[in-house]
Every structure is written in structure tokens, then in C-alpha cells.
Amino acid sequence: MGLSPNAGDYQRDMDEHKCNACGSNDLITVTMTVDKQVVSFTACHNCEAKWWFRDGQRVALDSVLDIVAST
């Protein structure tokens, strides 16, 4: 998630970025490209829930590990 040029847009983006488990928006997301695929890891500071996305779709950790292992 990039910064929007408009502060209002940025705040709306942050409001929509919430933990599915507890509803907190105190999250950290790390995005990287692995074997030409965009992979993002998000963790909630509040409840410690963690999840992965690959090319915009939520995936299991095993799926991400398969990509890394194949490179």
C-alpha cells in the first residue's frame, strides 16, 4: 500500500487496512517481489495474527515457501 498524495486518501487507505481477526489497524506489511511475483506479509501488532498475499490473493505460507524454494 503506497502513500496517497492527498492526506485524506491516505487516512482512508489506513482505515480500510484492518486485521480480520481483531479489527485493529495496528499492522505492519512487508511487500517483496519473488520470482516475478508480488508477495506481501502482514502481521497485527494487537493480536499477532499473520497472513500472506501473492499477486493480490490471500495464500497459505506453504504457497509462499514453494515460490522461494523454486528460485
Image (tube, rainbow, N blue to C red):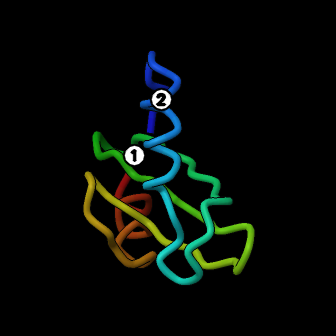
Q: Amino acid at mark 2?
A: Gly
Question: Which numbered disc flags the more N-terminal residue, 1 or 2?
Answer: 2
Answer few, some or many: residues within 10 Å of disc 1's Cα (few below 14, many 20 plus, some between 14 and 19). Answer: some
Could you tell me residue 13's position as x and y percent? 44, 43
Could you tell me residue 58's position as x and y percent? 32, 69
Report which residue position mark 2 lands on.
8
The residue that appears at 42% across and 31% down in the rendered structure is 9
Could you tell me residue 56's position as x and y percent? 27, 54
Answer few, some or many: residues within 10 Å of disc 2's Cα (few below 14, many 20 plus, some between 14 and 19). Answer: few
Choose between 62 and 7: the one closer to the eye.
7
Per the rendering, the mark at residue 48 is none
Report which residue position mark 1 lands on.
34
Secondary structure at numbered mark 2: helix
Secondary structure at numbered mark 1: strand
Could you tell me residue 67's position as x and y percent? 35, 60
Q: Amino acid at mark 1?
A: Val
When the figure is inspected, residue 71 is found, relative to residue 11, above or below; the finding is: below
